[in-house]
Amino acid sequence: MNDIALAVIGGTGLYQLAELQGPQAHQPVTRYGALSGPIRVGMLDGHRVAFLARHGEGHAHPPHLINYRANLAALQAIGARRVLALNTVGGITGRFGPRVLACPDQLIDYTWGRISTLCEEPGTEVLHVDFGEPYTRELRAGVLAAARAAGVDLVDGGCYGATQGPRLETRAEIARMRRDGCDLVGMTGMPEAALARELGLDYACLAIVANWAAGAGPDVDEVITLQDVLDNVAAASAGLPALLRAL
Ligand code: HPA
């Protein structure tokens, strides 16, 4: 099988990659059960690229019930080695306002009760993978270089805090996350990143800031609406096709 140059996992507001030419649907069976939906594999500038909507194409799977293991195992089964995760997030600190694109370099996991390892399967070896640097350095460098080449503004670095959801956070929770050192908050960054490491996949996150997190923006009383989130994701994603082509 021709290798897949890049697999892209789309988050909230990003359910397809319209630029893919001749997309074919793949839905391999994995030992971890069903994935979120079909993987669409097509050509982008002469390279095979796979796209999977993390929440399903109809946004049916909430963050805590996504079968992260099946999604990543299925991408690997069809030949993906490098995964670019698109994650819709809230911004906590100054550089990460709405419509900013960022490539975080650290994360803190606040999720609970999610299956966060492949080591639970009977007969599997227990792994203690190194996770000091949770995103693959070379892939991050590639994403940053691609953004420069494509003329897309992308913030280099930042700490992604992964929360349980599906509700948004309280102001006190965001204040605590700021004290902890988080710049961004989202609900899907973990366990995906850790599972990718266990599977030996290269993995980087491209975070799309949809809103100021609770109490983090200039208007502390601002109510976050889904429409604002979707509008900002759509606006911030305008440069994504050029970035992906360059990558
Ligand atoms: N918090 C958590 N996840 C999010 C947010 C947020 O404010 N915005 C988009 N995804």
Image (cartoon, rainbow, N blue to C red):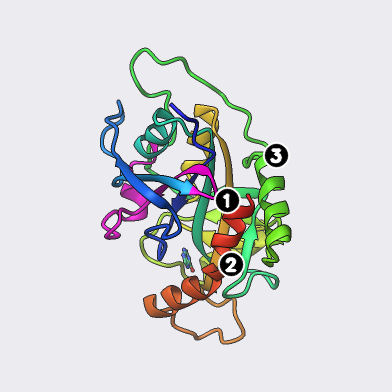
Checking the image for residue 239, the label placed there is 2
Give me the residue at 62% from left, 34% from top. 131
Q: Quick check: 184 above or below 70?
A: below
Q: Which of marks 1 and 3 is in front?
A: 3
Image: magenta residue range: 44-69
Q: How crowded is mark 1: few (under 14 residues within 10 Å), some or many (20 or more)?
A: many
Q: In this view, does 144 lie to the left or right of 38?
A: right
Q: Relative to residue 64, is residue 226 depicted above or below? A: below
- Please name the amino acid that badge 3 sits on: Glu
Judge whether 164 appears above or below 139 on screen. Answer: below
- Residue 152, x across and y down, in percent: 67, 66
Dot 2 alpha-carbon crowd within 10 angstroms: few under 14, some 14 to 19, many 20 or more? some
On the image, numbered disc 3 is attached to which residue?
138
The residues tagged by marks 1 and 3 sit, at their Cα atoms, a distance apart of: 12 Å
Please tell me which of labels 1 and 2 falls first in the chain. Answer: 1
**Circle 3 residues within 10 Å: few <14, some 14–19, many ≥20:** few
Whether residue 65 is in magenta: the answer is yes
Q: Name the residue under label 1.
A: 205
- In the image shown, does 15 or 48 lie closer to the viewer? 48
SS at mark 3 in the image:
helix
| Amino acid type, mark 2 | Gly
SS for dot 2: helix
Toward the viewer: 185 or 74? 74
Quick one: SS at disc 1? strand
Of tags 1 and 2, the one toward the viewer is: 2
Q: Distance between the residues labelled 1 and 2?
A: 16 Å
In the rendered image, residue 4, in percent from the top left (x then y), is placed at 49, 36
Q: Left or right: 103 with respect to 115?
A: right
